[in-house]
C-alpha cells in the first residue's frame, strides 16, 4: 500500500468513526427526549390523582404455559424441555405446560416425539411463515394458563428457579412483565467464534458441569451476550424468556406480525420494549436466573461479522418501518426478585478469559487507589498494564518525595543517555534484561533480544525484536538457546532486571561470558539518590535495591574493567547507570568465586552507611567525561 492509499484508508476510517459518534450522539439525545416524555406522563397522571398503589396485589396463580418455538433443532430442544420439566423447575406438574411451535422443521415435529416430556401439551405446526411471530401468537391463544412465558428461540436452557419465582411474582404483583436475563453457553461469545461439532462440545461441557442435576452450574459456562466492555444483565433490551399474563397481552397486544423476517428480526425487542414501557405494567427481572442460548447456528450466530452487520442493518430498517422509531433501548428501571449467588454476579461479557483479565486489572486499579488514598496522593490518573498477577509496584507503593536534584531530561534522562550510547556505538545487535514497558528496547535501531518474565509493551519497536518471557536465570540455563541467541553480534547490552545485587551480578557474568570483548554493558540503578532506595526490601515507588554493590565487587575483583557511573535520572529520581567496557569473556574470576561473593553480598560486607559513603566509592563521571566516552566509543565503532 503506497502513502496515498494509506492516507485514503485513514480518512475513510476517520469518517466511519465520525459516523459512529454521530449515531451515538443521536441515540443519547433521543434517550433524553424519551425520558422527558416519560417524566411528563408520570406527572400528568400524578396531577390527575391516579393512585399508583394497587391494594389488590397480584392474582391467583393457576399455572404457567411455556410457548417455545423450534426450527430444526431436535437435540437442542430436548435440552430445553429438560429445563422446563416440573421437577427441574420445582413446580407441581398440574401447574406447568409446554406448547411447542414447530416453525416448519423438517421432519415435522409431533407430540408423540416427546413422550419423555409429559409437560408438552401441544405441538402446533406453522407452515409458510419464516418468521416465528405468527406461531407465538397462536401459542398465546392456545395456552391453558393465565401466565405465559414466550421463548422465541427454543434452543435456550432455563435455570431451575424461573417458574417458582414467577409463581411468587404473579401472586403478589399486578400485571407483571418479567425479564429472565439471557446468556450464551460457552467460554466466549458465540458471535465471535465458530465451533465445529458445537452440540457435542456443549454436551461434554454440560456433563462435566453436572447438568441437569446442578442447574445453576450453567453460569460457570456462560458469557453475557454482546461485545461491550461492561454490560449488566439488567440493561436488557430483550429476553428469550418473556413472561407475562394473558391480561397484559390482551391489553398491549402480542407479537407484531409485520416482523416477517426469518427468525423474527427485531420482533422480540419490539414486544419487550412495548410491554416494559407500558406504565400500567410492572417490569421485573430475575437476576439470579438465566436463559442460556445453545450454539445451534441460528439466524445471526452462524454468520460472519460482515454478514451479521448487514442483516442487523436490515432488521433495524424493518423496525423503523413497523414502529416509526429507531430506538430500542430500555429506559425503564426494573424491580428485581429472587436470590442472587456469586456465580450470577461474575459472568463476564465477551469471554471467560476477558473476564479473568478484567478482574486482574480491576484488582490492580483497586490496589493503586487504595495506596493513593492512604498516602494522600493526588494528580494524574496512573496508566494501567495488563500484567496478569500484580499491579505495578511503582504505583502501589507509597510515593517517595524526591530530594530535588536538578532534573535535565535532555542530558540526564537515562533513556536519553541510552539513546546517545546507541548513536555512538551503532551496535549490530542489542541485548536487554528487564524489558518492562519496552521504553528502552524501543530505542534500538538494530535487531534486539530482550528477557523479562512479566513485560507489557506500550512502546512501538523499531526493528526486529525477540523477547523471551522468562527470568534471566532460566534463560541462561538453557545452553542451546543461549548459544543460538548469542550467535548474534551484541555490541550493546542493558541490564535492568531484578534489583538485588546477586541477581544483577549473575546477569553481568552471563552476558560478559557470551559477548565479544568490544561489547559495552550498561547497568541501571547503581547510584540511588536516597538511602531508602538502596535497601534490599522495597518500601516506596522508587527503588534501586542494592544493585550498587555490583560496582564494588567489580572494582575489587575485576580492576581490568572500565567503569563509568553517570548520574542518570528516571523521572524525578536519580538512579544512575554504569557504563562498563573492556570486557573479557575468558576471565573466570567472578565464576570461580561466585559462592563467596554471593555470601558477602547478602551479609554486610559491601553495605554503606549513607548515600555520601556510596557516592564516595563510585567512579562517577561528569557529563563532559561521558561525552568524551561517547566520542571514544564512536571512534572505535567507526574503525
Image (cartoon, rainbow, N blue to C red):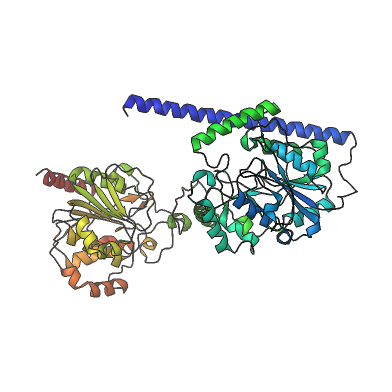
Q: Nearer the viewer, residue 609 or 183?
A: 183
Magenta span contains residue 538: yes
The correct choice, above or below, for 205 with respect to 256 in the image is below
Residue 481 included in the magenta stretch of the image: no
Q: Position of residue 283 (x, y in %)?
A: 76, 44
- Is 277 left or right of 477, judged from the image as shown? right
At 38% from the left and 57% from the top, the residue drawn is: 454
The magenta segment: 536-544
Quarter of the image where the C terminus is located: top left
Residue 448 percent location from the top left of the image? 25, 49
Q: From this view, report whether residue 293 is shown above or below residue 501.
A: above
Q: Is residue 123 visible?
A: yes
Q: Main secondary structure of the magenta part?
A: loop
User: Camera-side residue: 484 or 69?
Assistant: 69
For residue 250, which quarter of the picture?
top right
Give left or right: position of 629 versus 198. left
Q: Name the spot of residue 594 as percent of width and height, x first.
A: 22, 72
In the image, 476 versus 525, the foreground residue is 476
Viewed as shown, does residue 98 lie left or right of 459? right
Which quarter of the image is occupied by the N terminus?
Answer: top left
Viewer-nearest residue: 397 or 362: 362
Going by the picture, which residue comes out furthest to the left? 639
Q: Quadrant of residue 267?
A: top right
Residue 436 versus residue 11 in the image, above or below: below
Relative image position of residue 294 (x, y in whole percent) = 59, 50
Q: Is residue 377 left or right of residue 136?
A: left
Question: Can residue 362 be seen from the camera position used here?
Answer: no
Residue at the image point whose x is 37% and y is 66% from the top: 536
The number of callouts visible is 0
Amino acid at each position: 500500500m503506497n502513502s496515498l492509499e494509506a492516507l485514503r484508508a485513514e480518512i475513510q476510517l476517520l469518517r466511519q468513526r465520525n459516523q459512529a459518534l454521530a449515531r451515538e450522539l443521536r441515540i443519547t439525545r433521543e434517550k433524553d427526549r424519551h425520558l422527558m416524555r416519560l417524566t411528563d406522563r408520570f406527572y400528568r397522571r400524578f396531577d390527575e390523582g391516579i393512585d399508583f398503589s394497587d391494594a389488590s396485589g397480584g392474582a391467583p396463580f393457576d399455572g404457567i404455559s411455556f410457548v417455545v418455538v423450534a426450527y430444526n433443532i431436535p437435540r437442542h430442544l430436548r435440552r430445553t424441555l429438560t429445563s422446563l420439566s416440573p421437577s427441574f423447575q420445582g413446580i407441581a406438574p398440574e401447574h406447568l405446560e409446554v406448547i411447542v411451535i414447530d416453525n416448519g422443521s423438517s421432519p415435522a415435529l409431533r407430540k408423540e416425539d416427546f413422550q419423555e416430556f409429559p409437560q408438552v401439551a401441544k405441538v402446533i405446526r406453522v407452515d409458510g411463515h419464516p418468521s416465528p411471530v405468527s406461531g407465538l401468537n397462536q401459542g398465546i391463544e392456545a395456552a391453558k394458563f393465565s401466565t405465559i412465558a414466550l421463548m422465541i428461540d427454543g434452543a435456550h436452557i432455563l435455570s431451575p428457579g424461573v417458574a417458582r419465582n414467577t409463581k411468587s411474582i404473579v401472586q403478589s404483583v399486578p400485571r407483571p412483565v418479567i425479564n429472565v436475563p439471557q446468556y450464551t453457553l460457552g467460554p466466549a461469545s458465540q458471535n465471535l467464534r465458530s465451533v465445529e461439532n458445537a452440540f457435542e462440545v456443549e454436551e461434554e461441557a454440560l456433563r462435566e458441569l453436572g447438568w441437569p442435576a446442578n442447574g445453576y452450574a450453567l453460569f460457570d459456562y456462560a458469557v453475557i451476550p454482546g461485545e461491550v466492555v461492561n454490560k449488566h444483565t439488567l440493561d436488557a433490551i430483550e429476553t428469550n424468556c418473556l413472561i407475562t399474563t394473558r391480561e397484559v397481552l390482551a391489553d398491549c397486544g402480542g407479537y407484531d406480525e409485520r416482523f416477517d423476517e426469518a427468525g423474527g428480526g427485531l420482533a422480540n425487542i419490539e414486544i419487550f420494549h412495548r410491554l416494559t414501557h407500558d406504565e400500567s405494567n410492572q417490569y421485573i427481572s430475575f437476576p439470579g436466573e438465566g436463559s442460556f442460548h445453545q450454539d445451534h447456528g441460528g439466524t445471526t450466530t452462524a454468520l460472519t461479522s460482515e454478514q451479521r452487520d448487514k442483516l442487523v442493518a436490515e432488521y433495524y430498517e424493518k423496525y423503523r418501518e413497523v414502529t416509526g422509531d429507531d430506538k430500542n433501548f430500555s429506559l425503564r428501571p426494573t424491580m428485581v426478585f429472587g436470590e442472587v449467588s456469586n456465580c450470577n454476579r461474575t459472568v463476564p461479557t465477551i469471554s471467560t478469559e476477558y473476564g479473568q483479565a478484567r478482574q486482574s486489572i480491576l484488582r490492580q486499579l483497586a490496589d493503586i487507589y487504595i495506596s493513593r488514598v492512604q498516602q494522600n496522593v493526588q494528580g494524574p490518573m496512573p496508566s494501567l498494564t495488563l500484567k496478569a498477577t500484580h499491579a505495578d509496584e511503582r504505583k502501589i507503593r507509597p510515593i517517595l518525595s524526591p530530594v530535588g536534584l536538578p532534573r535535565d531530561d535532555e542530558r540526564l534522562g537515562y533513556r536519553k543517555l541510552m539513546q546517545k550510547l546507541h548513536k555512538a556505538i551503532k551496535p549490530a545487535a542489542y541485548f536487554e534484561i528487564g524489558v518492562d514497558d519496552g521504553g528502552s528496547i524501543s530505542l534500538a535501531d538494530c535487531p534486539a533480544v530482550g528477557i523479562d518474565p512479566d513485560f507489557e509493551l506500550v512502546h512501538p519497536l523499531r526493528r526486529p525484536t525477540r523477547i523471551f518471557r522468562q527470568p534471566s536465570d532460566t534463560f541462561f540455563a538453557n545452553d542451546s538457546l543461549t548459544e543460538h541467541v548469542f550467535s548474534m553480534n551484541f555490541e550493546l547490552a542493558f541490564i535492568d532486571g531484578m534489583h538485588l545485587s546477586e541477581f544483577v551480578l549473575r546477569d553481568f557474568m552471563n552476558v560478559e561470558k557470551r559477548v565479544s570483548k568490544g561489547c559495552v554493558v550498561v547497568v541501571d540503578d547503581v547510584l540511588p539518590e536516597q538511602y531508602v532506595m538502596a535497601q534490599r526490601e522495597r518500601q516506596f515507588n522508587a527503588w534501586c535495591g542494592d544493585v550498587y554493590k555490583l560496582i564494588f565487587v567489580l572494582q575489587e575483583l575485576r580492576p581490568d574493567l572500565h567503569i563509568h557511573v553517570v548520574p542518570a535520572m528516571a523521572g524525578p529520581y536519580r538512579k544512575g547507570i554504569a557504563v562498563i567496557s573492556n570486557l573479557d569473556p575468558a576471565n573466570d574470576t567472578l565464576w570461580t568465586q561466585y559462592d563467596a561473593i554471593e555470601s558477602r553480598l547478602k551479609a554486610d560486607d559491601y553495605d554503606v552507611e549513607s548515600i555520601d559513603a556510596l557516592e564516595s566509592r563510585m567512579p562517577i563521571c561528569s557529563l563532559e567525561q561521558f561525552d568524551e566516552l561517547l566520542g571514544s566509543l564512536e571512534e572505535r565503532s567507526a574503525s
